[in-house]
Image (cartoon, grey):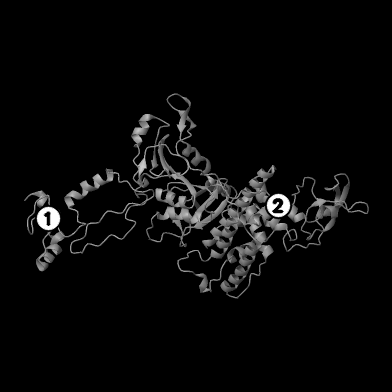
Amino acid sequence: MDRKKRWDWNKHRQLILDMIQNGDESEIEGFGDTSSDEDDPVGDPDYTPLNQESSESECESDREVPQPVGEISQPEGEVSQPGEAPQPSTSTNKHPLGQEKFTWRKKPFEAPDCTFKGESVIPPDVLPTPLQYFRRFITEEMIESMLVQTNLYSVQTSGTLKNVSTTVKELEILIGMYLRMGLCQLPGNRAYWENDTRCAMVADNMSRNRFQTLLTSLHFTDNTDLSNRQEGDKCWKIRPWLDRFRKQCLEITPEEYNSIDEQMVSFRGTRSPIRQYVKSKPHPWGFKIWARCTSTGILCDFQVYEGGTGKRTTLGMGGDVVLKLCETLPPGQNYKVFADNLFSSAALVHQLLQRQIFYTGTLRSNRLSGCLLEDDKSLAKRGRGSFDARVEKGGSMAIVKWHDNRSVTLISSHAAVEPQDKARRWSKQEKAFLDVNQPHVVKEYNTFMGGVDLNDGCIARYKYNMRSRRWYIYLFWHSIMLALVNAWLTYRRDCKLLGERPLNQRRFQAEVATSLILIQAKRGRPSLDSNTTPQPATPKRVRVRVPNDVRLDQVAHWPVKCAKRGRCTVCKQNATTTLCQKCDVRLCFTEERNCFKAHHFA
């Protein structure tokens, strides 16, 4: 029997039975009335012969079909199953992500007028203190809400209904101690109170047992209130805190250039509904956060990834994330957004252009939307700096493929090849640095894409890994570090506009921590007697300057006498034995001079 006419009985059994019962003509070769090879199949307009399907699809993939700008091609008809009536195609997403058919031409790209029209950053008249910058993101309202839920949770989880009875000031001290732990990191929490590894800047502010009690009682929502458990919200236990923090981040004046990428919050536990695994990350296990940052690293908007929904969308998961994070950008202001190949597609660029937001990003080879570019081997033969470019028929976007060490493809709606730049590269053959051609879109991407990575790097410098059995506590401490980094980057931006020299991140974090611990509070642990005269200072004692927020808070600044005379910190001329117990500085307090008052009311 001829191999071409061999057929499977199990595959066509139902069709044969229907033909016998209904008397219909058969579509299988060898049954029913014979017809010539040129005749089309009868009855099913969507029918495609099995022996012709592959050849026709290959021809159609090479054939270019002109379409209007941004128009998405309709999906091809599917082969109906035996025994089923042909159904009309109603789906609008039959193509894989990025395979929407645009029309591309090899012509120069005319860059649009993308002059920035948004609100510019206005520097303050007087530079705020580091604590004031920090409280722009962690407000007193957020602390008070956490206070209520922490006390309630301690009663709910205690067998004796014992309330932890914390206060706003105690929670501020707890946050300040956490920031200090990041500056002086030890293997565990208990090490800060042990004799051999005791850290005075942490242990002197709270006892170890009280610190552990507060850590186990931190909470952000009422577990007994079923209205808090919204359907599909896996982060409901920390949702009130995240929403308030996001609201504070949205108050930042957005800059012209923004980048979108993912952040990972390290978490190795197993009891979490949103834990993810990303193989290429330094901390592969943890929580994924989609973030939109300025080119200087300031976080403007974010979204915690709670896992896939199982629903396919036109743009895919990455494109939906970009649209969601760009909703908070004012439309029509010519903002520029940069992202990597996880998010990019031609359809996404087209949708953002409708809101007058320009997009640039790397592009995967399976999302070219019908754009035919030179292959990697051809570009490699032409050498470093070679490129190939195509422009969408309407001129709305361009795709550029550039070969450096390897080929990379980029898509942009505001930049392409011209004006070309030069990139300095080391040549192994010639043993020297060479200048290779670089398209303008590559330079734009390298300059403005690293905002989220810069924010990640600043967090990793002085972040203390506070362990907990409750997964949402990791998001809380991460938000504290996000607020600290945002405060420092905003402070540094204002210093640049005012022409002042900023503090580095370590000193900024230390001053915020000291202010949170000492402002509106007595110095030392609460168990100590505030009326006790301090011990005489040793000759090599190092005094820590308190921030201005603490110096001017007018709380518990008691004058005490010390045995040894020292120079006054105000007049710099006279020696005195009067010491401010909280500020730990010597101040004149005599009938002729009252430097003590001048120091605390300046």
Given residues 566 and 450, the one toward you in this image is 450
Mark 1 and mark 2: span between their CA atoms? 82 Å
In this orientation, which residue lies closer to the viewer: 12 or 400? Answer: 400
Which circle's residue, 1 or 2, is located before the other in the chain? Answer: 1
Left or right of 244? Residue 169 is: right
| Amino acid at dot 2 | Thr
Q: Position of residue 171 (x, y in %)?
A: 65, 62
Which of 309 and 565 lies nearest the eye of the viewer?
A: 309
Check residue 189 in the rendering and tell me which mark sits there, or answer none: none
Give the left or right position of residue 583, taking residue 344 as reference.
right
Give coordinates of residue 98: x percent, y percent. Answer: 37, 49
On screen, 592 above or below 426? below
Specify few, some or many for label 2: CA neighbours under 10 Å numbering under 14, 14-19, or 20 or more: some
Name the outermost residue toward the bottom. Answer: 160
Q: Position of residue 372 (x, y in %)?
A: 34, 41
The residue sitting at the right extreme is 591
Question: In the shown orientation, is residue 247 left or right of residue 106?
Answer: right
Residue under numbered circle 1: 7
Residue 279: x percent and y percent?
43, 49
Q: Secondary structure at mark 1?
A: loop
Q: Nearer the viewer, residue 304 or 360?
A: 360
Can residue 513 be seen here? The reply is no
Q: Residue at x 85, y 45 (%)?
A: 572
Q: Amino acid at mark 1?
A: Trp
